[in-house]
């Protein structure tokens, strides 16, 4: 457990370096300056009110993600983030599991009817507003697309390190606040409790081990 705490502290120090080098992004900055984003990278979302347990002046990461993890994929980093925030014109995002989890938490899976257009548009707008309240840090990683990419290594390593999925209530490190929306998440995917137990808006990798070597890769990329 002490090793994991040390790795987490190092992880957040690296993100602080990334913030100093590449800035802290908020939705309005994204809208105005999205062309300044790298073509490839890993993003780390922070949520208002979600703080580290032993470092109350640091926000904890609630979502990690990247893009182009399939061989040959050409999707752009900014496009992936826009899907999470919802498009500027319609406020409806496409292909964002992040939005699905937030929607399931806000409305309950049984009421999350994407086929009822009028209701769906209103609810997607509420999800957009919620996600747009978050800030994020970007670490540029300009390697080739694919599941063996450094971006994927950083993404999965970060998720596994941050996740409390395998820990008991008394063992959890940087647990979510009592009011964290994700504690209300309802999902169809078995066992259906990945978000609640991990403390992250992630599913993939929350129940996995991590190799601390990914921290060296992250530090190399964040220090450029």
Image: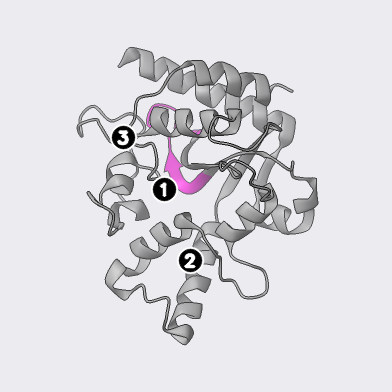
Q: Sort mark 1 into few (<14), some (14-19) or many (20+) by Cα contacts within 10 Å.
A: many
Residue at the location (59% across, 20% down)? 217
- The kind of secondary structure element at disc 3 is loop
Disc 3: which residue: 207
CA distance for labels 2 and 3: 26 Å
Residue at the location (42% across, 15% down)? 6
155 left or right of 29? left
Q: Position of residue 194 (x, y in %)?
A: 30, 45
Vertical placement of residue 186 versus 46, above or below = below
Residue 201 marker: 1
Disc 2: which residue: 127
* Residue 203 counted in the magenta span: no
Query: Of marks 2 and 3, which one's residue comes earlier in the chain?
Result: 2
Q: Sort mark 3 into few (<14), some (14-19) or many (20+) by Cα contacts within 10 Å.
A: some
Q: Position of residue 169 (x, y in %)?
A: 20, 34
Q: Position of residue 72 (x, y in %)?
A: 64, 43
23 left or right of 14? right
Circle 2 or circle 3, nearest the eye: 3
CA distance for labels 2 and 1: 13 Å
CA distance for labels 3 and 1: 13 Å
Please report the bounds of the magenta region as a residue range: 46-58
Query: Of marks 2 and 1, which one's residue comes earlier in the chain?
Result: 2
State how many labels appear: 3
* Residue 54 counted in the magenta span: yes
Q: Quadrant of the C terminus?
A: top right
Q: Quadrant of residue 222?
A: top right
Query: Of marks 3 and 1, which one's residue comes earlier in the chain?
Result: 1
Circle 3 or circle 1, nearest the eye: 3
Give whichever of 118, 176 is nearer the camera.
Answer: 118
- The kind of secondary structure element at disc 1 is loop
38 left or right of 109? right
- The kind of secondary structure element at disc 2 is helix
């Amino acid at each position: 457990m002490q090793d994991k705490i040390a790795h987490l502290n190092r992880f957040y120090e690296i993100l602080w370096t990334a913030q100093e080098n590449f800035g802290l992004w908020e939705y309005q900055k994204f809208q105005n300056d999205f062309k300044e984003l790298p073509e490839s990278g890993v993003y780390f979302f922070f949520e208002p009110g979600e703080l580290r347990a032993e470092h109350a002046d640091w926000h904890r990461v609630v979502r990690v993600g990247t893009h182009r993890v399939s061989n040959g994929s050409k999707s752009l980093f900014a496009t992936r983030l826009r899907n999470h925030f919802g498009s500027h014109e319609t406020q409806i995002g496409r292909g964002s599991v992040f939005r699905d989890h937030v929607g399931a938490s806000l409305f309950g899976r049984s009421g999350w009817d994407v086929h009822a257009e009028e209701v769906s548009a209103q609810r997607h707008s509420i999800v957009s507003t919620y996600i747009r309240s978050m800030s994020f840090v970007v670490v540029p990683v300009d390697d080739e697309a694919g599941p063996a990419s450094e971006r994927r290594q950083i993404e999965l390593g970060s998720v596994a390190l941050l996740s409390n999925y395998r820990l008991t209530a008394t063992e959890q490190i940087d647990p979510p606040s009592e009011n964290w929306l994700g504690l209300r998440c309802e999902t169809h995917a078995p066992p259906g409790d990945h978000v609640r137990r991990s403390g992250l808006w992630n599913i993939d990798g929350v129940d996995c081990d991590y190799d601390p070597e990914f921290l060296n890769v992250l530090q190399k990329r964040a220090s450029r």
